[in-house]
Image (spheres, rainbow, N blue to C red):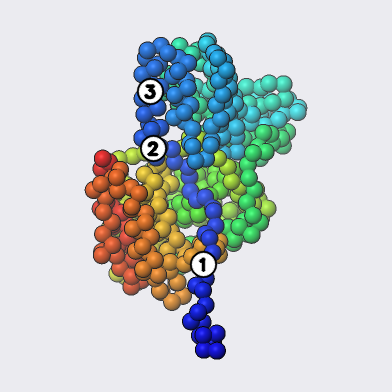
């Protein structure tokens, strides 16, 4: 009877598996050693004029074995391939003479002068590829003689082709009613509940940021306000992972601040606030159309030396101190988040750093992750950290990367668990101090 009442013989319930939800932008700079060696093989084979073998090695380098983003087939001297980049599929063929690739952007049932003018203008900014019209099919294409198809030319040519197409297809269809979506059947819709949670938190994060800004002196706190507005972009980009128009809106807001002009920060902040207000007016259906899953082959950002990452964190944390010490905890917490989230947004980070960043976001945005079905590492209502679980997770993240980064050591003894601001400061300071010198 006592066993039944107090559960002494009751089996311990297994925790529910975590949802499988991708976050953030795709990074292609974490290829294993075997893949990197295939790039070297491709380059050496090209120099030896073994062009067919060079092409084989190049596409093996490009393929991510986990996501199966590249399909490559050869039949003697001829072959074909296709690979995924967001909402687009790039398809190509090759033989002993030439390699050709193209991607469908949209359908244009009726000729449109404004559309063609837009494409003509964008052509001037392309180095390897070009826009084209095949009957009613609006597309982009790239080709190269095999004798000049070095791995570098193929990489940057196919990257330009695929990333530009992935960005422009949705924007063109939105801007020109004459165009119709095409060749995007491969994208995966996400569950309705997940869409609704992401929409709700998108609204919540924007509103709480704008509310905080409205209570601050625009001139005196212009720097802190800029931190809030930029950190919000990077939070949405990583946690919501938008595509299409919403992604373009975020990039436009970022460009307002970082545009090299003589305008004061106060004016830039004002313009960013107005753009956020426009996002708030979007209907759930408009936001839902920008939320879907897709596969990628190329990263849209490039790797940087780790010192660049460390300097970003250091600079933000230096500015955090005043807000922390003068009782602005919300601003301070967002500045702590900014230092590393700016890097996650702007650079292709080592995967282990992204995993540390993801853990930090699971703590700083605990309610959001709990709503999605993840375990809690922090309870903001009680200001209570799951300390043991956090420390265990840090060790789990570190373990597999010790071989590649033997000097990397996250000093867990330096963490603070008294409040979120101090935790964020200590956690990101440890990220700043990591020795990421590879073996």
Q: Which mark is residue 14?
A: 1
Q: Residue at x 64, y 54 (%)?
A: 191
Q: Which is in the foreground here, disc 3 or disc 1? A: 1
Q: Residue at x 46, y 75 (%)?
A: 381
Q: Which mark is residue 32?
A: 2
Q: Which residue is mark 3?
A: 41
Give the farthest residue toward the bottom. Answer: 1
Q: Residue at x 26, y 54 (%)?
A: 409
Q: Is residue 132 left or right of residue 308?
A: right
Which of the marked residues, 2 or 1, is nearer the chain's N terminus? Answer: 1
**Label 2: which secondary element:** loop
Number of other residues with Cα within 10 Å of mark 3, as a class: few under 14, some 14 to 19, many 20 or more: some
CA–CA distance between discs 3 and 1?
A: 47 Å
Give the farthest residue toward the right. Answer: 110
Number of other residues with Cα within 10 Å of mark 1, as a class: few under 14, some 14 to 19, many 20 or more: few
Task: Say if 210 sits above or below 149 in the image.
Answer: below
**Label 1: which secondary element:** loop
Front residue of 133 and 68: 68
Would residue 345 be visible to someone looking at this image?
Answer: yes
Residue 351 in the image, given as x and y percentages of width and height: 39, 46
Q: Quadrant of residue 29?
A: top left
Residue 125 in the image, given as x and y percentages of width and height: 50, 26
Which of the marked residues, 3 or 2, is nearer the chain's N terminus? Answer: 2
Front residue of 35 and 132: 35
**Label 3: which secondary element:** helix
Which quadrant is the N terminus positioned in?
A: bottom right
């Amino acid at each position: 009877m006592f066993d039944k009442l107090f559960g002494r013989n009751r089996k311990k319930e297994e925790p529910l598996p975590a949802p499988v939800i991708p976050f953030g932008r795709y990074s292609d700079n974490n290829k294993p050693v075997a893949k990197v060696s295939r790039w070297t093989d491709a380059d050496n084979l090209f120099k030896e004029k073994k062009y067919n073998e060079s092409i084989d090695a190049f596409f093996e380098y490009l393929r991510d074995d986990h996501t199966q983003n590249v399909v490559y087939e050869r039949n003697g001297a001829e072959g074909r391939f296709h690979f995924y980049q967001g909402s687009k599929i790039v398809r190509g063929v090759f033989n002993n003479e030439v390699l050709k690739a193209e991607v469908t952007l949209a359908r244009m049932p009726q000729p449109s002068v404004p559309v063609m003018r837009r494409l003509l203008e964008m052509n001037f900014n392309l180095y390897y590829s070009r826009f084209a019209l095949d009957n009613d099919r609006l597309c982009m294409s790239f080709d190269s003689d095999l004798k000049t198809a070095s791995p570098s030319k193929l990489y940057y040519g196919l990257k330009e082709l695929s990333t530009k197409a992935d960005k422009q297809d949705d924007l063109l269809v939105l801007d020109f009613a004459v165009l119709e979506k095409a060749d995007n059947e491969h994208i995966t819709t996400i569950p309705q509940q997940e869409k609704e949670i992401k929409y709700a938190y998108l609204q919540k994060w924007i509103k709480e940021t704008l509310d905080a800004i409205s209570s601050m002196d625009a001139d005196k706190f212009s720097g802190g306000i800029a931190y809030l507005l930029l950190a919000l972009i990077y939070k949405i980009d990583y946690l919501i992972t938008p595509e299409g128009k919403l992604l373009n809106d975020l990039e436009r807001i970022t460009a307002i601040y970082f545009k090299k002009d003589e305008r004061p920060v106060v004016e830039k902040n004002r313009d960013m606030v107005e753009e956020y207000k426009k996002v708030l007016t979007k209907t759930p259906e408009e936001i839902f159309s920008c939320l879907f899953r897709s596969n990628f082959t190329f990263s849209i950002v490039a790797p940087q030396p780790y010192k660049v990452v460390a300097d970003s964190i250091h600079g933000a944390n230096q500015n955090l101190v005043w807000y922390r010490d003068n009782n602005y905890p919300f601003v301070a917490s967002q500045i702590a988040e900014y230092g590393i989230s700016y890097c996650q947004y702007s650079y292709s980070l080592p995967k282990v750093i992204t995993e540390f960043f993801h853990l930090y976001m699971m703590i700083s945005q605990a309610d959001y992750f709990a709503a999605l079905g993840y375990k809690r590492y922090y309870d903001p209502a009680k200001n209570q950290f799951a300390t043991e679980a956090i420390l265990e997770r840090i060790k789990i993240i570190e373990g597999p990367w010790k071989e590649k980064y033997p000097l990397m050591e996250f000093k867990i003894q330096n963490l603070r668990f008294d409040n979120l601001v101090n935790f964020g400061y200590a956690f990101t300071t440890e990220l700043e101090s990591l020795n990421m010198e590879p073996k």
